[in-house]
Amino acid sequence: MTKIKFESKLFEDLKDEIEEIRVAQNEVLTQTKETLIAALKAFIKEHKELEQLTWTQYTPHFNDGDACIFGVRSLEVKIEGDEELYDTYYFKGNKQKTVSNSKEIVAALNDLETFMNEETTEIVLKKEFGDGVRVIVTRKSIEVEDYDHE
């Protein structure tokens, strides 16, 4: 943290309050990260049909003049016994398909993807796994690989 000499006591008090917020934020993020890991492992164990969850998360380098904002992208799943990774909804020919015939699994994946794209969840995902990565969740492990999105 930058050390700045302030002449006013109010600035010193403000600096102390900001430091307290930073410490509290780090404590909450540490607790939340532990819960996140447990929740991801529980999700894939709960849904026996799922073999793997994979997603990318990154800040784009260019966004056609708009702000480049970190985000979770392209949640994909591997169904047990299949070698392919699929989006929850995908096209085969001109027909839209779902990754599973189970409405429960499709609904759970939709809920997970919505949750992962919430701003506060993205903060935790970025803090835990980083920026410019692919995250791979299986029943046995959570792996993080570098991901070049451009």
Image: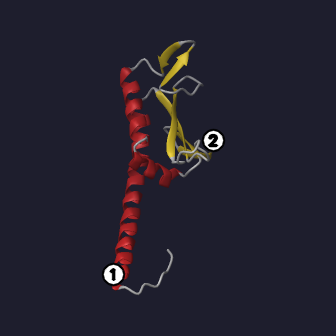
Side of 144 relative to 4 (left or right): right
- Residue 149 - label: 2
Where does the image place residue 55, in percent across and percent down from the top left?
A: 53, 38
Q: Secondary structure at mark 1?
A: helix
Foreground disc of the pair 1, 2: 1
Residue in the foreground of this view, choosing between 41 and 4: 4
Q: Quadrant of residue 105?
A: top left
Residue in the foreground of this view, choosing between 11 and 28: 11
**Picture layout, residue 104 above or below residue 7:** above
- Measure the alpha-carbon separation of dots 1 and 2: 45 Å
- Identified at 57% across, 12% down, the residue is 93
Where does the image place residue 130, in percent across and percent down from the top left?
A: 54, 52
Q: Residue furthest top?
A: 94
Where does the image place residue 41, in percent across and percent down from the top left?
A: 44, 41
Where does the image place residue 33, in percent across and percent down from the top left?
A: 42, 53
Q: Amino acid at mark 1?
A: Leu
Quadrant of the drawing holding the C terminus: top right
**Picture layout, residue 149 above or below residue 123:** above
- Identified at 52% across, 50% down, the residue is 129
**Picture layout, residue 61 above or below residue 113:** below
Q: How many marks?
A: 2
Which of disc 2 and disc 1 is earlier in sequence?
1
| Colouring method of the image | secondary structure
Q: Quadrant of residue 104?
A: top left
Q: Amino acid at mark 2?
A: His
Q: Residue furthest front?
A: 65
- Residue 10 - label: 1
